[in-house]
Amino acid sequence: MAALVDVSQPFSLGLFGLAVLLTWTLVHTIYSILKDPLRGIPGPLISRFSSIIERWYLITGDEMLWIHSLHSKYGPVVRINPTTVSLADPDDVRVITRPSYPLRKAEVYEKMQPGIITERDPKLHAQKRRRFGHQLSNTETAKFEPFVPQLFEDVQAGLGEVVFSSNFPLLFRIRNIFRPTMLSTDNPDGMFAFGRNSLVQYKKELETHGETKPTFFSKIMLDPDLQGLSMAQVEQEANEFMFAGSDTTSTSLVYLVWEVIRNPEVKKRVLEDLSKLPEDWTDADLLQLPYFTGVIHETLRLWGSAAGPLRRCVPTKAIESQGYVIPPGTELSLQSYTLHRSPKVFSEPERFLPERWINATKEMWDTNWAWGYGTRVCLGIHLATQEMRLAAAALFRKFPNIRLEDEASAARDMRVKNFLVNSPTGKKLMVLTH
């Protein structure tokens, strides 16, 4: 009998310890729920305690679509992890992102090198915008137009002319296939190494021969107000400009082609618009085509490349959305993919309707986040839209009979994934040009 007691005693102590641990865990969980300032915000139950589901969708490139599905299920305010809330009501988002209430970028950006895109400090970011902003104004980008039409053969060759006066295959090639090479997301180290080497080489050329034609970085290197920048600073900014300006334009162009050729009426009206162009047409002529311009805007509404969640921090004052109070320190997730599909602003939001932009309302323009918002709006907006207009116009004028090789395959290939920027799952769009 004594032997039995000796054997069972450790087992009993183990059970007792396990019971204590489970009781403590239960009490701690209940206490955390009762004290949780976000406890009233709807969302998946597991999102109250863990980020594991969100992380899974982030890794697989489906976080943007997952968040969008949560808003469809729970409404415009959704909790996606223990400390993060996603907002999707256009009116509320416009209020909390106004310049007078600047939201800092989330702490995740601290892990990145501080460039104009990743800079968290509003004052430092404003300084960088002033430093580079005028180089990408409408007036300045107009000077690049003679070089940009080369985009038709290889979009990035044209961008290489604008940025470095050299060629590098970064965006997409057109033969019978549109294929985004995805260099910036699949191989960022290679892209950054290219940028670093190009800057060194280009600086030598400027010192030897001076400026032979206008480029973005020649203006930076020759501008007296900017020559105080170190080479490391110029390199960091170059990396960010290349990262932001590579996949973004090419991906939107591929989606533009897909939407136009899978919608016969849209394609018909695009060709009618383009038939009005003179033989020596320029970008200024394209801006006079209302339907074609609407195609650009509608593509960016549905398929803007930077449509995934933008992370911001609630500062010292709580904010309110749809009756929910979101306390300071909470991380916000704001994504244009969902905002651009709001039925409050866009009728039939899932349909590709370029004509909606011909007489667009102020509310539509205010909800247009294709290029970001407020003081964080993309500096390259004018150059990128110019590229899209010129490349799309050249394509449809050259290949008016372009069509999908297979509609079902195209639909599968074009399912969107988001890894910082959007891209088609298949990374290609198979088309026939004759």
Image: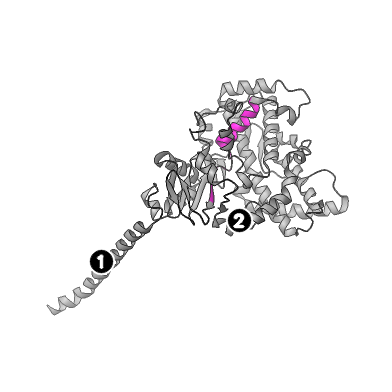
In the image, residue 415 sits, relative to residue 37, either above or below, namely above
Judge by depth and name the residue closer to the eye, 275 or 320.
320
In the image, residue 140 sits, relative to residue 265, either above or below, namely below
Helix, strand or loop under label 2: loop
Kind of residue sitting beneath label 1: Ala
**Identity of the residue drawn at 32% across and 59% down:** 30
Q: Is residue 20 left or right of residue 177?
A: left
Q: CA distance from mark 2 to mark 1?
A: 46 Å
Residue hosting label 2 = 120
**Identity of the residue drawn at 45% across and 41% down:** 76
Viewer can see residue 183: no
Pointer 2 local density, CA inside 10 Å: few below 14, some 14–19, many at least 20: many
Q: Position of residue 263 (x, y in %)?
A: 56, 24
Q: Residue furthest left?
A: 1
Of pointers 2 and 1, the one earlier in the residue sequence: 1
Pointer 1 local density, CA inside 10 Å: few below 14, some 14–19, many at least 20: few
**Identity of the residue drawn at 55% across and 57% down:** 107
**Identity of the residue drawn at 60% across and 26% down:** 359
Specify the segment rendered in magenta.
Answer: 291-311
Residue hosting label 1 = 19
Q: Position of residue 154 (x, y in %)?
A: 70, 37
Kind of residue sitting beneath label 2: Arg
Q: Please, what is the dominant secondary structure of the magenta stretch?
A: helix
Q: Is residue 212 left or right of residue 178?
A: right
Position of the N terminus by quadrant: bottom left
Position of the C terminus by quadrant: top right
Q: Nearer the viewer, mark 2 or mark 1?
A: 2
- Residue 38 is marked as none
Q: Is residue 17 left or right of residue 206?
A: left
Q: Is residue 432 magenta?
A: no
